[in-house]
Amino acid sequence: MRAAEIIEAIHKKAKGLGNIAIMEVCGTHTNELHRHAIPQALPDNIRLVSGPGCPVCVTAQSDIHAALSIAGMKDTVLCCYGDMLRVPCGDTSLLGMKSDGADVRSVVSALEALEIARENPLKQVVFFAVGFETTTPHTAVLIEDAARENVGNLSVLCSHKTMPAAVTALLSGKSGIDALMCPGHVACITGRKGFDFVPEKLKIPAAIAGFEACDMLFALLKICDMLEKSQLECFNAYTRAVSENGNDPALRLTYKIFEESECEWRGLGRITESGLVIRDEYSFFDARRRFEIPDFTEKNARMCICSKILRGEALPSDCPSFASVCTPETPLGACMVSSEGSCAAYYKYER
Ligand code: SF4
């Protein structure tokens, strides 16, 4: 079906549904939905709400503070994915520290940190690892390779998160969200079954979506269909990439290196079993055990409502700072930094 035909079908289905709110869990979906102007193409009674799926946005200030502390240590190289560089913490950021002389490097792959460690044997190289099920296997490969090669100057500051516990904690017992659009890249790893918790625990339907306009529209059509028929299931609308059981080697490697643990999320607080920590067998590569990191007290940026946005309780346009003092060039909060952040997507496509 072409996009226009799917949109027409959604309009027909939506007529009998009343007002519904669909949460897109993933930041990539937020960005792509707005890039394709899909919210405007939907009927007025369908509202899209952004969820907590942008990895940079949900990384707690305490973790960014830990990265800043390590970056400030002598003879240390701090490596991270590019978006993390600009997240403000107090009156600085990793980029600010880099400008002040700290050795902070942006990498596109976790394994680049291993190369940097090999090239700089007299320095401690720390990889600041963030992201969900999609990126965790890359960090697991990094640690496994470093262990195999006996690399003594590499460690990982782990801030990896998993989706089920956080989404359950966010939506359990909360009315107002009628269905979820689930991230196709996460489901490539977890399999379709990885999102069965949505109908089973949250008692709302879900559809796994890819990232092309037609992928997202098809998932929205299936959601309308399930709502119309009162069907409770997790539908795989991205079968060209997502299997029923996911990527078994990636999952096995992930849980060989990491184990589930309580985790701090920006905006959501501490959530049981929603994060990953490095197992004792690989503790040598755990930066939290290798370095002494000073305590941190959480302070949110003034006039920033990122927490509410990440909980789906407010839109970026509700924030008094949006597009005035807070812009992608001068971000006050994490949601304006990453291209996957809701505020950045609204700034780019909805103003
Ligand atoms: S617009 Fe800026 S200040 Fe407002 S919530 Fe978003 S990131 Fe925070």
Image: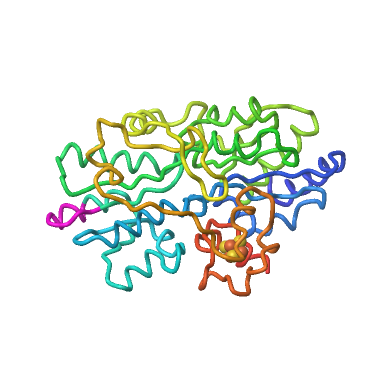
> Which quadrant of the rendered structure holds the N terminus?
top right
Name the residue at the left extreme: 122
Q: Is residue 197 or residue 13 the one in the foreground?
A: 197
Q: Quadrant of residue 64?
A: bottom left
Residue 249 picture location, percent across and down? 36, 30
228 lies above or below 94? above
**Residue 344 shows up from this direction:** no
Q: Is residue 61 or residue 46 the one in the foreground?
A: 61
Based on the picture, tell me whether residue 156 belongs to the magenta stretch.
Answer: no
34 lies above or below 274? below
Based on the picture, tell me whether residue 117 belongs to the magenta stretch.
Answer: yes
241 lies above or below 122? above
Taking the image in four quarters, ligand 1 sits in the one at: bottom right
Q: Which residues are magenta?
A: 115-125
Q: Is residue 104 or residue 349 the one in the foreground?
A: 104
Residue shown at 40% from the left, 37% from the top: 276
Residue shown at 74% from the left, 27% from the top: 231
Question: In the displayed structure, does residue 123 sit left or right of residue 64?
Answer: left
Residue 65 picture location, percent across and down? 39, 56
Check the image and tell me how it is coloured.
Answer: rainbow
Question: In the displayed structure, does residue 328 sit left or right of residue 220?
Answer: left
Residue shown at 22% from the left, 50% from the top: 114
Residue 278 picture location, percent across and down? 32, 36
Q: Is residue 16 or residue 9 the one in the foreground?
A: 16
Residue 26 picture location, percent across and down? 56, 47
**Residue 202 shows up from this direction:** yes
